[in-house]
Image (cartoon, rainbow, N blue to C red):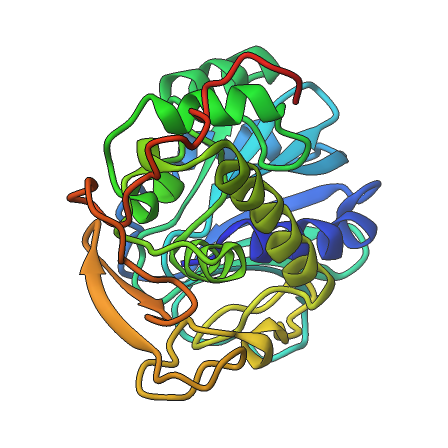
Amino acid sequence: MPELPEVETVVRDLRPLLVGRTIHSVQRISRVALRRPWNTAWDVRVIGQRVEAVRRRGKWIVVELHDGGRLLVHLGMTGQFVVLSADQFRESHTHLLFSLDNGCELRYRDIRRFGSVQWLPDADRVSAFFIEQGLGPEPFGVEPKWWRERLAGTSRNLKATLLDQTLVAGIGNIYADEALFRAKLHPARRADSLTRTEADRLRRAVEEVLTRAIDARGSTIRDYVGGSGLAGGYQDEFAVYGRDGQPCPRCGTTIVALRLAGRSSHFCPACQPRTLRGDRGGEGKPPCAPRIADTGED
């Protein structure tokens, strides 16, 4: 599934290609509808509208239209949202096509059909939608004390906690594994077992991994491409994700995988140990370690 770096890359690609362009027509192409199908009643809401902005919220893309309406897009597992020339080959599994005033087309393609494109009337409705989804804050610039308190408040394992979009929005399977490796934390460890230092280290690791992945245009494993059709490159930098059976880039120990939160989790058993007692979900906390909900300075 495209995660925050992939969606951010799509948004950055789309901005110069879409902003200022007017939508001339909408076509539903595929005979097989998306699992959340486009409502053809929305056609009249977007035809003739100029695109004013393109932004991201978590794993969602928001396209702002001149009259205040919004296109709200989720890429699901295999979605692609790209601007291409109208004469460029139209691939199978293309579901929606928005013709633009410059002869280009904004295309939504989705092999597995878990994604969606919908229209909402205004910014307030979009905000309400995200509240209904329980979407947490963006992972960049999270207040350290708030982060520590949220981790201290759950007994779930770290992998499940990072995947929870109500904690912070945008982290998925790939970047949870990579951030935990960078922070030297076992994915099965309980979130409320972390020391203050460990919690802060994880927060920084999340930001660092996501920032580097954005710089590399995200990760292309199978279907993902950016908004201009170009693939990502961060898959070439994976430390642990998808590398079970291969040597750890830090210490050479064989990377292993286990099932957590319904997902495969990849980690280095030497760099990310489960050795201390007192934590059934993973590594315990030394008895004199400060609690991560500490009210001292950040």
Percent across and percent down for residue 254 are 34, 84
Percent across and percent down for residue 225 are 57, 69
The answer to which quarter of the image holds residue 123 is: top right
Inspect this view and state whether residue 4 appears.
yes
The C terminus lies in quadrant: top right
On screen, residue 198 versus residue 277, left or right, reads right
The answer to which quarter of the image holds residue 167 is: top left
Inspect this view and state whether residue 120 appears.
no
Percent across and percent down for residue 54 are 70, 39
Q: Residue at x 70, y 66 (%)?
A: 228
Q: Residue at x 40, y 30 (%)?
A: 288
Percent across and percent down for residue 191 are 33, 36
The N terminus lies in quadrant: bottom left
Q: Residue at x 42, y 23 (%)?
A: 150
Compare residues 169 and 254 and report the one nearer the observer.
254
On screen, residue 19 versus residue 160, left or right, reads right
On screen, residue 177 versus residue 69, left or right, reads left
Q: Residue at x 49, y 81 (%)?
A: 251
Please say if 298 is above or below 249: above
On screen, residue 128 versus residue 17, left or right, reads left
Compare residues 293 and 130 and report the one nearer the observer.
293
Q: In the image as oriented, which residue stretches furthest toward the front?
A: 288
Compare residues 136 and 100 and report the one nearer the observer.
136
